[in-house]
Amino acid sequence: MESEAVPSRYSRQVLFNGIGNSGQARIIASRVAMVGCGALGTMQASLLVRAGVGTLRIIDRDFVEESNLQRQILFDEEDVRSVMPKAVAAEKKLRSANSLVKIEGLVEDLNASSVDRLLGGFDLIMDASDNFDVRFLINDYAIKNRIPWIYGACVGSYGLTFPVLPGESACLRCIFESAPPAGISPSCDTAGVIGPIVSVIAGMQAAEALKILANQKDRVSRKITTVDLWDNRHEAVDLPSPHPDCPCCGRHAFPYLDGSLGADVTTLCGRNSVQIRRREGAYINLDDLAKRLEPVGRLEKNRFLLRAAIEGYQLTVFSDGRAIISGTYDSAIAKSLYARYIGN
Ligand SMILES: [Zn+2]
C-alpha cells in the first residue's frame, strides 16, 4: 500500500520497526470484535481505537455503575447518572478519540443464538468478558471459523492472558476442559480488583492484537502469562500445542454453539424472575458461597438454599447450581448477576 494511505496521526506506530507502513495499513484495514466492555474492555478498546483498527465492534449487555469508575477508564459520572449502556458510552468516548475508526457499540448479550450475527466476519476477537460460558462460546466459534482470539481475565491484583491461534496453539478447552464449578472462584464483585492489573493484562492483549493485525504472527506470544502486582510475580509457561483429543479443536465438537452446554436461562412468567441452570449439571457449596457473598449482600440460608439481597435484586441459589434471580424479567441482567456473584 502507498505511504499516503496511512494518515500522519499514526506516525509513531509507522516509525516503530515492528509495524511500519505496511503493518499500519493492515491495522487500518482490520475488523476486531470485543466481547465485554468493563475494565479490560475499556482499556483494550482505547488502545485499539487509538492504534487505528478499521472497525471495532463492542458487545456488552451492562449499564455503567458508580463502582465501575475506579477502573473502567472510558466512563464518567454522567454515564452513571444517565444509566448509560456501556457499549453506547464507550462508542461515544472512542469516537472523539479517533473519528477514522468505525466503532459499533452493541447493547447485546452474546449467546448461542446471537453469536453468528455478532461475531461473523471479524479478523480477531478480544475477550473482555467476565465469565467462562462466554469464553467457551467464543472459543467454539473461533476454532470453528479459524479466527484468532485473545483470552484475558483479572481479579484482585492477579491477571492471566494468552492468545488462541486456531490450529497453531492450544485452544481454551485444551487448557480448561470445562468451566470451573460455579460458586468457587472469586470475582471482581466479591474479591475486588485494582486498576493497575487491568491495564497490564489489557495492554498485553492489545499488544498481541497489534502483532496479529499487522501480520507479525511469528512475534505473537506462545505463553500463558500470569501477573500478580501485589505479590510481585510475573510468570509465563509455554502454551501447549493443540491437543488431538481436545473436544473442541481436536474432535470439532462445539457444544457451546449448539447450546448443549452452558447456561440455560428461563424467564419465570408472573414472578418477575429469571431462572439460570447449568446444562452440564453443577454443585455449589452454599457455605463457601455464603462466605464470599457476606461482604456484599444481606443473606438468609437454610440447608436447601442461600438467598442474597444484592443491588436491589434477590438471588436464590440452590446447591445444584440453579439460581433464581428475582427483581427482573431481563435475562441479560440475570446472567450478569449470576456471572458476577455466583458463577464464573
Ligand atoms: Zn483445543
Image (cartoon, grey):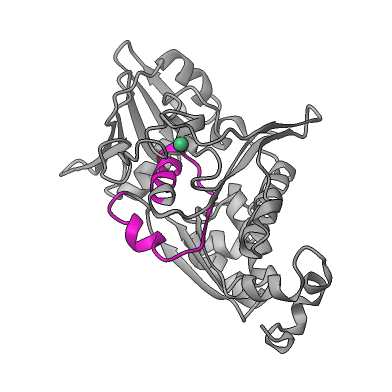
Above or below residue 306? Residue 140 is: below
- Near-viewer residue (182 or 313): 182
The reply, left or right, for residue 133 in relation to residue 101 is left
Residue 43 visible from this viewpoint: no
- Near-viewer residue (109 or 6): 6
Who's the residue at 51% across and 18% down the image?
Answer: 291
| Residue 229 on image: x %, y % | 77, 34
Residue closest to the far bottom: 4
Residue 116 sits inside the magenta stretch: yes
Who's the residue at 70% across and 49% down the image?
Answer: 204
- Please count the marks in the image: 0
Who's the residue at 50% across and 47% down the image?
Answer: 129
Q: Point out the image quarter for the N terminus.
A: bottom right
Residue closest to the far front: 244
Residue 339 visible from this viewpoint: yes
**Within the image, what quadrant is residue 278 found in?**
top left
| Residue 70 on image: x %, y % | 67, 49
Q: Which residues are magenta?
A: 112-141
Above or below residue 60? Residue 129 is: above
Who's the residue at 43% across and 28% down the image?
Answer: 177
The reply, left or right, for residue 80 in relation to residue 2 is left
| Residue 21 on image: x %, y % | 74, 76
- Near-viewer residue (123 or 108): 123
Residue closest to the far top: 303
Residue 219 sits inside the magenta stretch: no
**Within the image, what quadrant is residue 80 found in?**
bottom right
- Near-viewer residue (111 or 171): 171
The reply, left or right, for residue 221 in relation to residue 318 is right
| Residue 298 on image: x %, y % | 45, 27
